[in-house]
């Protein structure tokens, strides 16, 4: 009962409060954008040669307002926003009308999720292992080599590294496809041949994300381990004749992993941030490309759908890690 009252309940309250505030911001923010989706839709009809009869103009405007949730006062729009949100209905997309927003998200999310989730986890594991060993054995020659590589790759803007890999391995040496997530005109079915095509298209974007991610986690973990290894309990373990391998694994890296676990939760929640640049550079289908089109066309419904999904993913991942934290840190269980 003490765990529920002192640990679980405050975190659940914070979780729902953050979700509520975040979704409220998602509602108001697109309405302050300079673009007007209704006027943009009418302008598009005019440029395509559409003839707007004045008799039906007001009816058309009212219909579009209803589709975009812009009907009535701001308060009415806000109430309707929550009603539609609880039903999982964000209405139709503007630039792919009349396709529902949720259908577009369901089509794009698997591409982003598997690529960025897998690369984030891989880079986190490799980066923390290398960083933990490098922080403890900092005088080794291989550590200095990795430090030199990290100093070059880590500060490099992501799009520069991505474009460099694209030019090198897709243009100069045409080993991998220039862009896309699958072969053009082919329908994906589960077979070894199609799986290889899928992996070939995903290799360059995955490699660029892993390289940046590995050296980011490497440097962070190395600094934490260098601080942890100077603690008194590590010195006492050495004086007590504890095997060095055990000291590294059980005393140093295990304690240094705690802030890295929190960082992993934030990284998993913020995969849409990496999706935007990755998918634009490599023409990769997914949430990033969808978000870019939504911003470019002023698609209110699609912007709110993607932003809502991002907020829920970030807050939920942090909540899950926070609830699992007592399993990693005995001090939390003690308190």
Image (tube, rainbow, N blue to C red):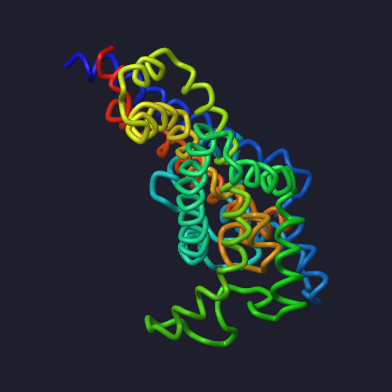
The residue positioned 58% from the left and 52% from the top of the image is 301
Return the x and y of residue 52 as percentages of the image width and height.
77, 69
In which quadrant is the C terminus drawn? top left
Left or right of residue 137, residue 291 in this image: right
- Give above or below for 232 relative to 263: above
Left or right of residue 328, residue 135 in this image: right
- Give above or below for 285 relative to 9: below
In which quadrant is the N terminus drawn? top left
Between 331 and 110, the residue placed more toward the observer is 331
Return the x and y of residue 102 as percentages of the image width and height.
47, 59
Return the x and y of residue 15 as percentages of the image width and height.
41, 28
- Give above or below for 229 relative to 45: above
Between 74 and 94, the residue placed more toward the observer is 94
Return the x and y of residue 168 as percentages of the image width and height.
74, 71
- Give above or below for 13 relative to 6: below
Between 4 and 19, the residue placed more toward the observer is 4
The count of marks equals: 0
The residue positioned 57% from the left and 56% from the top of the image is 67
Question: Can residue 323 be seen in this snapshot?
Answer: no
Left or right of residue 4, residue 140 in this image: right
Left or right of residue 296, residue 47 in this image: right
Give the quarter of the image for residue 237. top left
Question: Can residue 140 be seen in this snapshot?
Answer: yes
């Amino acid at each position: 009962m003490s765990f529920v009252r002192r640990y679980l309940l405050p975190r659940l309250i914070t979780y729902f409060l953050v979700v509520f505030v975040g979704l409220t911001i998602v509602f108001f923010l697109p309405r302050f954008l300079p673009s007007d989706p209704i006027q943009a839709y009418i302008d598009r009809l005019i440029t395509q040669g559409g003839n707007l009869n004045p008799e039906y103009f007001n009816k058309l405007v009212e219909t579009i307002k209803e589709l975009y949730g812009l009907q009535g006062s701001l308060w009415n729009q806000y109430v309707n926003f929550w009603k539609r949100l609880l039903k999982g209905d964000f209405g139709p997309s503007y630039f792919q009308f009349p396709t529902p927003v949720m259908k577009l998200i369901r089509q794009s999310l698997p591409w982003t999720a598997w690529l960025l989730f897998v690369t984030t986890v891989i880079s986190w594991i490799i980066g923390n292992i290398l960083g933990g060993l490098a922080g403890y054995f900092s005088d080794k020659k291989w550590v200095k080599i990795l430090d030199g590589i990290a100093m070059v790759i880590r500060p490099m803007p992501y799009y520069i590294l991505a474009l460099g890999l694209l030019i090198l391995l897709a243009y100069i040496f045409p080993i991998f496809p220039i862009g896309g997530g699958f072969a053009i005109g082919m329908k994906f079915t589960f077979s070894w041949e199609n799986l290889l095509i899928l992996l070939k298209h995903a290799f360059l974007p995955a490699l660029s994300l892993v390289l940046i991610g590995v050296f980011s986690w490497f440097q962070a973990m190395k600094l934490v381990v260098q601080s942890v290894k100077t603690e008194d309990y590590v010195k006492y373990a050495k004086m007590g004749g504890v095997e060095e391998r055990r000291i590294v694994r059980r005393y140093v890296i295990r304690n240094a992993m705690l802030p890295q676990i929190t960082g992993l939760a934030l990284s998993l929640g913020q995969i849409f941030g990496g999706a935007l640049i990755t998918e634009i550079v490599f023409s990769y289908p997914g949430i990033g490309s969808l978000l870019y089109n939504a911003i470019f066309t002023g698609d209110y419904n699609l912007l709110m759908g993607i932003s809502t999904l991002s907020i829920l993913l970030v807050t939920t991942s942090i909540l899950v890690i926070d609830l699992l934290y007592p399993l990693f840190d005995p001090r939390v269980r003690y308190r």
